[in-house]
Structure formats: C-alpha cells, structure tokens
Amino acid sequence: MIIKKNIDVPEDVPEEEGIKDVLRRVLIGPDDGSFNIIMRHFKVLPGGNTPFHTHNWEHVVKIERGKGIVVNEAGEEIVTSEGESLLICENEKHQFKNPFAEPFEFLCIILNPERS
C-alpha cells in the first residue's frame, strides 16, 4: 500500500501545444507501482486552459476546488464546479478553461496509455 500527501508531490508544468497556466501533480502512477491507473491533479490558474484535444482513452474527472469551463466536442462551454464529476469518452474532443479569479482544480484519472 502507498499513502502519500498530495502536497508532497511536486508540481510540474505540462509542455503541450495549446496549454496555458496549468500545473500538474501525478499523485499515483507508475513511479508508485501503479502501472495500469494514473491519478493526476490539475490546477488551471486564472486565465489558463488545457488544449482543445482528444486522446485514445477515456478518463474520469472530479472537480476538487473552484469552478471552470469544460468545452465539449461541439464547442459548447459548460460551467463545472466543486462537487461535480465528469466522464470524457475515448476520442471525445474536450478542453478545460478558467476565466474566473480563483484557481480551478480537478483530479483526472486515466488508464495508463502506455499499457492500454
């Protein structure tokens, strides 16, 4: 069993095209012996966004703090906030944005794309 304090996991800055003002922590992943499932924490700073993108795996998202915008495949912008959970299907185009004054934080849990 692995038990970690989230605050002890270093934040990194994802380097992807179209990403702006986003911090990430890999809370549980291959470095911890979890080779199939990866749990990440994202913090989208005010004015920040993830890319409008797709990938070949589904993921679940749990909003932890604040509120933000999730953009769906049709380009519709939907406000989402703390206490909500989302399922983003395989190859479904999506994006997270934060036009608000406070950070927008969420957990993102995926199957390890290198093993699926």
Image (tube, helix red, strand yellow):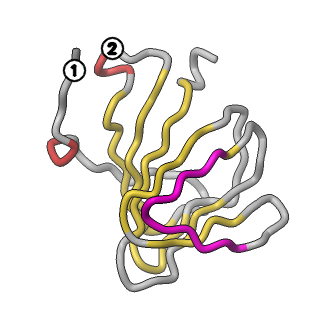
Residue 95 x %, y %: 64, 61
Q: Quadrant of the C terminus?
A: top right
Disc 1 marks which amino acid? Ile
Please report contact status of discs 2 and 1: CB closer than 8 Å, yes or no.
yes
Answer with mark 2 or mark 1, whichever residue precedes in sequence. 1
Neighbour tally class for label 1: few under 14, some 14-19, many 20 plus, Cα within 10 Å:
few
Rendered image quadrant of residue 82: bottom left
For badge 2, the amino acid type reads Gly
* The stretch drawn in magenta includes residue 50: no
- How far, Cα to Cα, is label 2 from label 1? 9 Å
Residue sitting at 22 percent across and 14 percent down? 1
Magenta-colored span:
77-87
Left or right of 53, for residue 27: left
Q: Is residue 105 above or below residue 29?
A: below
Q: Answer with the quarter of the image where residue 18 lies.
A: bottom right
Residue 103 is left or right of residue 9, and the answer is: right
Snapshot quadrant of residue 32:
top left
Query: Residue at coordinates 60% horizontally, 39% vertically from top-left?
Result: 59
The residue identified by callout 2 is 33
Residue at coordinates 21% horizontally, 20% vertically from top-left? 2
Label 1: which residue? 2
